[in-house]
Image (spheres, helix red, strand yellow):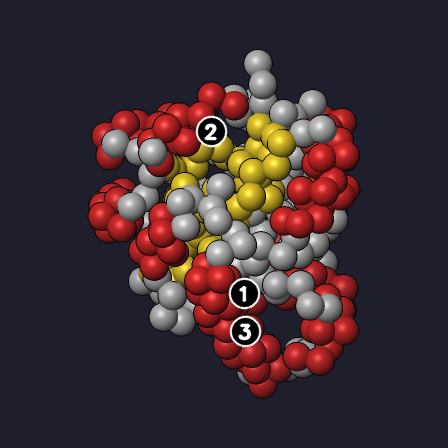
Amino acid sequence: MKLIDLHVHSTYSDGTLTPYELAKLAKDTGLTAFALTDHDTVDGIPDALSACQEFEIELIPGIEFSTEYQGKDIHIVGLELDWKSPRFLSEVHLFQDSRNIRNRKMIAKLHDLGNIDISWEQMEAAFGKAIWTRAHFARYLKDHGYVKEMKEAFSRYIGDDCPYFVPREKVSPAQAVRLIRSTGGIPILAHPLLYRLTEEGLLTLIEELKNAGLLGIEALYSTHTPEEESFVLRLARRQGLLISGGSDFHGSNKPSISLGTGRGNLRIPYELLEKLREARG
């Protein structure tokens, strides 16, 4: 069976491996293909394409858009989109601007209300021009002694229900879905159970996204229990969505997650990608 991974991050967002290192690891792991889905950026795709040619594996160009829905971060993965399109790149810059606004507000909250020694310049010195996510803030808090583990940063400071969390502004998941479809891509609702929506709330979100062009849902995911996976599979069947799967690999930022296999529970067949391609038309 040809195995793939449709949700992978590099140093161009909040992963700790370069695109070259990802391609080598994918080859060593025995994957046939993987999707580079960095947060709100496609800047790592040229490096990944070059590396995948060297290691003779397939790269699926992708992105993971971070959006806001009812005060929560909702992530939409886009696969096989026209990542060189000027219109697409212009829209991506709007997503990046929204993220930068959010990051500045989060820095201000952490500094002014949390008494954290943090500034834009300090974050830039630590992480350069990568697209910063909350994982970068968690890493900063850990590296500067405010928390012992990155997960503590999410539970105390920057998780959805924490005092210093700031939601994204104005960018909706439906916008992301429509943008991906407009470039010929395949939009996927990523890790649907991480948003802690009620079943009714999740169904409402899915209906809105289907109306915008959603094609798939990430049922095969590193943190899903067998029961959770079965729930999402049933949900997909009921809602007429295809199945996607990915490890959400971040390197050492998520040390328990391995490329391709997650926590050892993943086997994502190439057939899933072929079905998604057929549905796109």
In the rendered structure, which amino acid carries the disc numbered 1?
Ile
Residue at 61% over, 64% down: 132
Q: Are marks 1 and 2 in contact (CB under 8 Å)?
A: no
Can you tell which mark lies on residue 100? Answer: 3
User: In what element is the residue under mark 2?
Assistant: helix
Q: Residues within 10 Å of mark 3 (few under 14, many from 20)?
A: some
Screen quadrant of the N terminus: top right
Secondary structure at badge 1 equals helix
The residue lying toward the viewer, choosing from 90 and 233, is 90
Name the residue rendered at 63%, 25% in the picture: 32
Task: Quote the CA–CA distance across marks 1 and 2.
Answer: 34 Å
Q: CA distance from mark 3 to mark 1?
A: 16 Å
Q: Nearer the viewer, mark 2 or mark 3?
A: 2
Q: Nearer the viewer, mark 3 or mark 1?
A: 3
Q: Which residue is mark 1?
A: 158
Is residue 106 toward the left or the right of residue 55 in the image?
A: left
Image quarter in which the C terminus is found: top left
Answer yes or no: is residue 275 visible: yes
Label 3, secondary structure: give it. Answer: helix
Residue placed under numbered mark 2 in the picture: 273
Residue 62 in percent (x, y) is at 53, 46
Marking on residue 66: none
